[in-house]
Amino acid sequence: MKYQHGLTLIEVMVALLIFGLTGTAILKAVGDNLSSVSELRSITYATQVANNQLTRIALQQTWPIKNNVKGEMEMGTRTWYWQQKVEKTQAADMVQVRILVSEDATFSSTVTDVTTFFGKPGKAL
């Protein structure tokens, strides 16, 4: 009796197919992960820019808080653009402040939008 050694052509092709599908799935997962990391980095920086502006407002303690104020801030090797929107609430001594942050000055799309409420300084709520 003669024994056969090695793999048949079909076995090699099936192994290559499995390897190719596995490699493609791994590359897609890595690409998605890198994309997510970049997006999370942008959201983190944008949120920090918004929080910095809200802290400035709190420290200034001016009333009324100005509406439609715009500015820019350098953070993470990029320039971030922010816009402040103030809306009245049912309470006369309280306003809602939204800070929108974008990567472009035209605000064609925003990276984050942070909202908080401020009361009139010196007034107990």
Image (tube, rainbow, N blue to C red):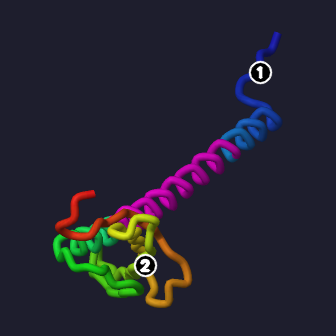
Up the image or down, 120 lies above or below 62; here it is above
Up the image or down, 20 lies above or below 121; here it is above
Q: Which label belongs to residue 105?
A: none
Q: Circle 1: is it few (<14), some (14-19), or many (20+) Cα within 10 Å?
A: few
Question: Which residue is denoted by mark 2 in the rendering?
Answer: 85
Q: Earlier in the sequence, mark 1 or mark 2?
A: 1
Residue placed most toward the observer, 61 or 110: 61
Question: Is residue 21 shown left or right of residue 94?
Answer: right
Quarter occupied by residue 38: bottom left
Give the magenta-colored segment's residue range. 21-47
Q: Circle 2: is it few (<14), some (14-19), or many (20+) Cα within 10 Å?
A: some
Residue contact at pointers 1 and 2, CB within 8 angstroms: no
**Residue drawn at (32%, 85%) of the image:** 72
**Residue drawn at (50%, 57%) of the image:** 36
Quarter occupied by residue 84: bottom left
Give residue 79's position: percent from left, percent from top.
33, 83
Secondary structure predominantly adopted by residues drawn in magenta? helix
Q: CA distance from mark 1 to mark 2?
A: 78 Å
**Residue drawn at (44%, 73%) of the image:** 88
Quadrant position of the C terminus in the picture = bottom left
Quadrant position of the N terminus in the picture = top right
Hey, what amino acid is under mark 1? Gln
Residue placed most toward the observer, 42 or 106: 106
Indicate which label's residue lies in the foreground, 1 or 2: 2
Q: SS at mark 2?
A: strand
Give residue 27's position: percent from left, percent from top.
58, 53
**Residue drawn at (44%, 78%) of the image:** 102
- In the rendered image, residue 29 lying in the magenta stretch gets the answer yes
Q: SS at mark 1?
A: loop
Q: Which label belongs to residue 4?
A: 1
Hey, what amino acid is under mark 2? Lys
